Image: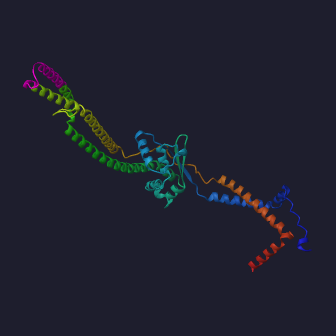
Amino acid sequence: MTPDTAAPRPAPAEATLLDFAAVLLRRWKLILLTTLAVAALTAVYALTRPRVYTAAVTLVPSATGGGDARAQMLAAQLPGFLRLGGGGGNPAQAMVQAILNSGSLRDSVARAVARTPEGRAAPAGELGRVMSRQTQVTSDPADRSITVAVTATDPRLAARLAGAVPDAVNTIASALSLEAADRRRETLQKQLDTARERLAASEERLRDFERRNQASALPEQARQSVEAAAELRRLVNAAELRLATLRRSTTPENPQYRAAEAELAGLRRQLRQITSGSGGEGLIGGGAAPDIKMQALRLTRQYNADEQAYLALSAEIMGQEAGSSDLTVVSVLDAPSVPGVPSGPRVKLLVVLGIMLGGVMALFLAFTVDYVARARGSSEHQDFFRELDRFSLRRRA
């Protein structure tokens, strides 16, 4: 029979629940032994692991006026702060979270505890390992508290490490605050020098203007100009009346008439000088007074602005120099205590997990063994198992 005329192979029957149950009945010993073996190994692992103890300290960000203000300034200058609750935390809380997640805190706590009896008794490298791998930081957005849990094989060491966390956080925050304050002070000093130069220039411009225009006596000069103009108008009127009287009784060639006419012309000339803005000696013309006054006001306003900027920068530098260098960003809500009950290993939980894992592995192994046994007895897979046996014989030889 040619391959084209070969009968098609029958489709394999679908497996039913009875088929699965049959496998469980045939391989129940394998399933039981595998499950017990994995559970026993898990129990041995749990029982041979050393007991560990967990000590926890609960912190709350400080909300004092000065500390919180400096914390806001520092949090605004230092990048990378984690905002709790998706960015809604306050600056002090963001600073605490960033410090607690930093390597500087772990190193600082390890160095501080290394000088205590518990730290000296710990094996070499134990403090760093505990702070790096066995320290957990959790936060509660409801009350903004932060809990630091430290796990170690020595309960006193765990309590000592957890208790050193608040002081280390405040020390690091103070160092960061001083560094930020120094940078801020340098910037303010540069701005103060620039403001001082601008203030000196404004003073010099105002002094030169007053020296040129006698601006300090501007109101008095304006009053004198008004009085002089009024007096000249009175004299002009009187001279016009006298000239009109002389015109009726004399001729224009009369010396008295000519003198009165010249006097009237002189008075009118002086009056035009005052009213047109040219003024006289020591007087300000009516047209020039508004311009001089506006220029004086402009220079005075610029001088006042430069003076206010200089005084504000000086006050800010003095406030920074008078501030305390200690920055308290956290307070202890619940102090750590020496744990009396070990927190691990959890033997019962590990045994239960071992039984569950062993059961899964046993089922997989049972179905695999049963499938291989049935496939070996089938003529469809004889070529594969024949080659497998030959390979095994060659390996043994």
In the rendered view of the protein, which quadrant contains the N terminus? Answer: bottom right
Q: Position of residue 370 (x, y in %)?
A: 81, 64
Please tell me which residue is depicted at 39% across the width and 49% down the height of the picture.
180
Q: Nearer the viewer, residue 220 or 289?
A: 289
In the rendered image, the residue lying farthest to the left is 255
Instruction: Residue 248 in the image: state x and y as whole percent.
Output: 12, 19
The answer to whether residue 328 is seen in the rendering is no
* Left or right of 293 on screen, residue 87: right
The total number of labels drawn is 0
User: In the rendered structure, does residue 393 fall within the stretch colored magenta?
Assistant: no
Q: Is residue 232 magenta?
A: yes
Specify the farthest residue to the bottom: 397
Residue 395 sits above or below residue 21 on the image: below
Task: Determine whether 45 is above or below 228 in the image.
Answer: below
Q: Residue at x 83, y 57 (%)?
A: 21
Q: Residue furthest right?
A: 1
Where's residue 284, x and y in %? 20, 33
Which span of residues is magenta-colored? 230-257
Residue 312, image quadrant: top left
Residue 187 position, x and y percent, is 35, 49
Q: Main secondary structure of the magenta part?
A: helix
Q: Residue at horizontal 89%, vertical 71%? A: 4
